[in-house]
Every structure is written in structure tokens, then in C-alpha cells.
Image (tube, rainbow, N blue to C red):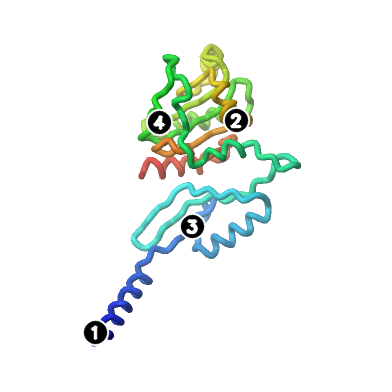
């Protein structure tokens, strides 16, 4: 009798687990939601056209399912030898961005916890960089949408006077950190613009080049960070 009860209880447990386990679904590149099999098929198909880049932008949980908002794209190498201009920067994904190595407006090093508590967008640029300038309106719009919910910072090797003269004619509503050539070189950033997205703990989560055509994805990332 006890054996039958154990078998019955085990059956109930397995039934409950099967029925109420959360299923994984995926919303790829803003398209309709698909199941895991179709997601894997989409990954395989995308990978045929270049190096696969898979970005998890946001996760939404319900009682019976988990929806992953994902970007899938094939990155074609920019040079014949396969050089990725953002390859060195992407190595920082998963590490804490060391803001304490940079100087604030008082010429003192930032506190290492300066970025803690809010997600952060960091844009590396310079005033003579056409693609950097082209994306400024999109960056201003991003800051306006998430004003007070995230940190928005630019870092450049330009000096303070150069930045001050630039923003007189071109509005750029980020917090600017100039005179940072030494730190930028140490990070091995050589492609401009380069942008980093950090989580609330200051951990680098995403690396982007020019972001003009990625703004919907970036907004989704910040929505996920600010909701959690």
C-alpha cells in the first residue's frame, strides 16, 4: 500500500511539473513570438550569412512561460583578414567598468561606486568623427526617454575647451568626460563611435558601434534594466 502511495505521489509530482513548468518563447528582432524549436532554426539560418551575434535584450516572465526578447544578426567581417574593430572592447563584457580611472569635473577620480544603482550608457566619441555626430540626436532622445532612470556619459580624448565649443552649436545632453586619451588607449578602443551599456552594478553587458539603427533594441534593454 505504501509503495502504491509513493508511486501515486510521484505521478502527481511529475504531472504538476510537466503541466506548470514555464515554457520558453522568443521574440526575435521584433517579430512575432515563436517557440524554442523555431528559435533554434532561426539561429542556424542566420549563422549561414556571417558570424552570429545573439543579444538577449530583455526577459519577461509569466505564470506559465518565459519570453526572451532577442536580437539575432549575422556580422560580416569588415576586413578580409577577419578583423573585428570592436573585438577588444567586447572582451570587457561581464566585467565592471572602472569609472574610478577617469576624472570628474573637479579633476579628481570618480568613486568606484559612482555608477552603481542605475544602468549606464557610455559613448566614446570625438568632435571630428562624422558618424559620432550623426548619432547625437538619437542619443539625446534616448536620454530624454530615460531621464533620471539611467546614467548617460560620453568619454573622449578631446580637451574640455573643444567639447565646450562643440556643444555651443550641437546640443549633446550627456555628462562629458574629456581629456581621457590615456584611459581610452588602455581600453584599446580604436573604433568610433563605440558605446557600452552597463547594468545597475556597473557591469558591461553590451557593446555597440554606431547606434542609430539599434535604438529600438537599446530602448528595450533599458526598459528591462529599469523595470528590474
Q: Please report whichever mark, 2 or 1, sits nearer to the chain's N-terminal start.
A: 1
Q: Which residue is mark 1?
A: 2
Asked whether the residues under the numbered discs 1 and 4 touch, taking CB atoms below 8 Å apart as contact, a structural biologist would say: no
- Quick check: 149 left or right of 8? right
Q: Earlier in the sequence, mark 4 or mark 3?
A: 3
Q: CA distance from mark 3 to mark 2?
A: 33 Å
Pointer 4 residue: 115
| Contact flag, marks 4 and 3 (Cβ < 8 Å) | no
Secondary structure beneath disc 4? loop
Say which residue label 2 marks: 189
Q: Residues within 10 Å of mark 3 (few under 14, many from 20)?
A: many
Which circle marks residue 26 in the picture? 3
Label 1 to label 4: alpha-carbon separation: 59 Å
Q: Residue furthest bottom?
A: 1
- Which percent across, then down, holds residue 117? 35, 35
Whether 18 is drawn above or below 127: the answer is: below
In this orientation, which residue lies closer to the viewer: 103 or 145?
103
- Please, which residue is most extreme toward the right here? 80
In the figure, residue 208 lies in which quadrant? Answer: top right
- Work out how far the residue at label 4 is from the one at label 2, CA to CA, in angstroms: 20 Å
Q: Earlier in the sequence, mark 4 or mark 2?
A: 4
Direction front: furthest residue: 3
Circles 3 and 1, Cβ within 8 Å, touching? The answer is no
Asked if residue 15 lies left or right of residue 27, the reply is left
Amino acid at each position: 500500500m505504501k509503495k502504491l502511495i509513493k508511486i501515486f505521489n510521484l505521478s502527481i509530482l511529475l504531472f504538476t511539473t510537466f503541466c506548470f513548468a514555464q515554457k520558453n518563447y522568443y521574440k526575435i528582432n521584433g517579430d512575432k513570438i515563436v517557440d524554442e524549436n523555431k528559435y533554434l532554426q532561426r539561429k542556424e539560418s542566420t549563422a549561414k550569412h556571417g558570424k552570429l551575434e545573439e543579444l538577449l535584450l530583455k526577459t519577461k516572465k509569466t505564470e506559465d512561460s518565459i519570453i526572451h526578447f532577442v536580437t539575432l544578426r549575422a556580422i560580416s567581417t569588415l576586413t578580409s583578414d577577419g578583423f573585428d574593430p570592436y573585438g577588444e572592447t567586447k572582451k570587457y563584457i561581464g566585467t565592471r567598468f572602472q569609472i574610478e580611472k577617469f576624472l570628474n569635473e573637479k579633476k579628481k577620480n570618480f568613486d568606484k561606486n559612482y555608477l552603481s544603482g542605475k544602468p549606464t550608457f557610455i559613448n566614446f566619441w570625438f568632435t571630428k568623427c562624422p558618424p559620432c555626430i550623426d548619432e547625437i540626436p538619437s542619443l539625446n532622445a534616448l536620454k530624454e526617454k530615460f531621464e533620471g532612470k539611467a546614467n548617460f556619459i560620453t568619454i573622449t580624448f578631446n580637451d574640455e575647451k573643444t567639447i565646450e565649443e562643440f556643444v555651443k552649436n550641437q546640443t549633446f545632453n550627456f555628462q562629458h568626460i574629456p581629456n581621457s586619451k590615456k584611459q581610452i588607449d588602455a581600453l584599446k578602443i580604436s573604433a568610433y563611435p563605440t558605446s557600452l551599456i552597463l547594468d545597475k552594478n556597473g557591469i558591461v553587458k553590451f557593446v555597440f558601434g554606431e547606434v542609430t539603427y539599434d535604438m529600438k533594441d537599446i530602448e528595450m534593454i533599458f526598459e528591462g534594466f529599469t523595470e528590474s
